[in-house]
Amino acid sequence: MKILVPVKRVIDYNVKPRVKADGSGVDLANVKMSMNPFDEIAVEEAIRIKEAGKADEIIAVSVGPAKAQETLRTALAMGADRAILVETDDTVEPLAVAKILKAIADEEQPGLIMLGKQAIDDDSNQTGQMLAALMGRPQGTFANTVEIDGGSVIVKREIDGGLETVKLTMPAIVTTDLRLNEPRYASLPNIMKAKKKQLDVKSPADFGVDTAPRLTTTNVSEPPVRQAGEKVADVDAMVAKLKALGIA
Amino acid sequence: MKTLVWVEHDNKTVKDATLAAVTAAGKLGEVHLLVAGSGCAAVADEAAKIAGVGKVHLADDAAFEHALAENVAPLVVDLMGHHDAFICPATTTGKNIAPRVAALLDVMQISDILSVEDGDKTFTRPIYAGNAIATVTSSDPKLVITVRGTAFDKAETSGGSGTVEAVASTGDAGLSTFVSSEIAKSERPELTSAKIIVSGGRALKDAETFQEVIIPLADKLNAGVGASRAAVDAGYVPNDYQVGQTGKIVAPEAYFAIGISGAIQHLAGMKDSKVIIAINKDEDAPIFQVADIGLVGDLFKIVPELTEKL
Ligand SMILES: Cc1cc2nc3c(=O)[nH]c(=O)nc-3n(C[C@H](O)[C@H](O)[C@H](O)COP(=O)(O)OP(=O)(O)OC[C@H]3O[C@@H](n4cnc5c(N)ncnc54)[C@H](O)[C@@H]3O)c2cc1C
Ligand SMILES: Nc1ncnc2c1ncn2[C@@H]1O[C@H](COP(=O)(O)O)[C@@H](O)[C@H]1O
């Protein structure tokens, strides 16, 4: 079985994003970029499934600029077997990403596609569900545990009230939540090896996908800034303030 | 514009999260509701009383009992023949279903809207963990939207006179099955509707200490209990306690952040709270930059004293 893992290059989660003064977007010049954290979890899970003997090839895919090759090399260094970059400098929305991923899945026929639940830049939380819809396949979103059981995958999902377990007929789409695993760091020898692994570069047009955006962003602004209040000296002062505000 | 709002429920009662979505839908036009579930006629009757609601579509079938997206999405797509927008609360159920519907309709979903702007296809939404607010306009013929619950008032639960109309089931897609769920029953206010929230972070050491320190304060204040990701990852509390960019978004009257540093991902989930109270031993912790009332010191001394004096 093959596992397809889409990975997105995004602003590093440790960086505080800055909005450009002209309202055109977030300033990404000279900002540290990394693999979307949820996608690292997806790569890790795919590797664990392969290590357990339940998969034989992991293919990492990214849709993005030439620099997204670095993100794919990270996935390869962690343990993915080969990679596909669908290169474009345009912003590609989740719907179009899902269409490209569907075209790749049609060619590769993976049994499982593991995505992150959410990209931490657009915070859309859509691509996996859209891909599942386009493929007419089941979706196990916000996965806390994933277990392959013959032709099915059993996914325990993190939901608002707690946890829910569903059983999906493969091929299936899974999106990862934070507790699924702790991703490994790539070792130096593996980083070296990853440089020699196969990385194909394609374009959205190769898959016949129109990436023209459906949403137009007319402005990006900073949220209202919250002013820090005061520090109080001790618990009595805190209690007095809470009482004055009617909280206690 | 005619909208179809997903009613969040447990086959018995309407969940609060529905109400903010109804308010958002009201800004777009006529509000219809969808109650999909199993043995859920009482939910439809309750939903019909929500202020401002027109028709309530009731799809009562075993296939919808657990709101599996594979089964629900085709039903919604059918109904979208007569509606211009599909609106879900941004709950885990809404986030699971809405994008599946959007892709089947070939439209781009607008996630987690904060406001409806002039013209009815322009919205604001948070990006980059709420560090930026984008204004976006859709060019799609139909809209699929999820609504951030804290950004809209709740519609009144009475005064409405909607009519309930049964719709034919689209059946079981045969792709997925529900196996089980672990839903904790608690007498405590739900996080997303609690007036006061007491949250604990990594500093709470372990599950037992979290219980001993945080719970008595929460009890005293009749508060909901939340946590940082670090506290959830370390197993102090279950996953549904997580507040933040990728957890629950809350905006209570008062939010107590105890032993929480204030990482941007945590702030993303609570910085719209009316009053923020922070207790942290590090006077430079970022949480103090958003706190209205801060107290620097050891939480293991402060919190029991505070609980006693309140
Ligand atoms: C993709 C991604 C998504 C994320 N999503 C979320 C999210 O939704 N929600 C979230 O919360 N985080 C999220 N995070 C994690 C976030 O980046 C932080 O790691 C996390 O919020 C830190 O939790 P914390 O403040 O409890 O722990 P720490 O940062 O370790 O802070 C502990 C604090 O306790 C204080 N302290 C220690 N001992 C005491 C004491 N005795 N008395 C008083 N104070 C004390 C310390 O000074 C410190 O400030 C996410 C991260 C990633 C990468
Ligand atoms: N440009 C992209 N390239 C590869 N994978 C992507 C891309 N955009 C989104 N994804 C995948 O879809 C997930 C959810 O993204 P989103 O729907 O944008 O929040 C991510 O965690 C990735 O796994």
Image (tube, coloured by chain):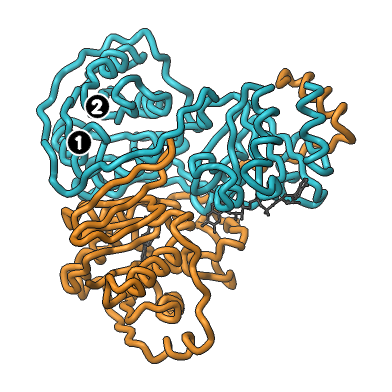
Chain colours: A orange, B cyan
Find residue B221 and report its horizontal and vertical position in percent. 67, 22
| Residue in the image at 58% along x and 52% along y | B234
Which amino acid is tagged 1?
Answer: Val
From the viewer's side, name the closer residue of B171 and A70: B171
Q: Chain of mark 2?
A: B
What's the residue type where badge 2 is placed?
Answer: Leu
Q: CB under 8 Å between callouts 1 and 2? A: yes
In this view of the protein, which residue sits in the foreground, A129 or A212? A129
Marks 1 and 2 on same chain: yes
> Relative to B100, is B28 above or below?
above
User: Which is nearer the eye, B138 or B226?
Assistant: B226
Q: In x, y percent, where is residue B55? A: 22, 18
Residue A98 vertical position relative to residue B12 in the rendered view, above or below: below
Mark nearer the N terminus (1 vs 2): 2
| Local SS, label 1 | helix
Q: Is residue B38 something that shows in the picture?
A: yes
Quarter of the image where one finds residue B67: top left
Q: Which residue is mark 1?
A: B76
Give the residue pinned by disc 2. Answer: B34
**Residue in the foreground of this view, choosing between B124 and B147:** B147
Residue A35 placed where, x, y %?
A: 47, 69
Residue drawn at (76%, 40%) of the image = B279
Taking the image as shown, residue B183 lies to the left or right of residue B43, namely right
- Kindly indicate the quadrant of the structure image that contains residue B135: top left
Q: CA distance from mark 1 to mark 2?
A: 8 Å
* Residue A222 visible: no
The chain under label 1 reads B
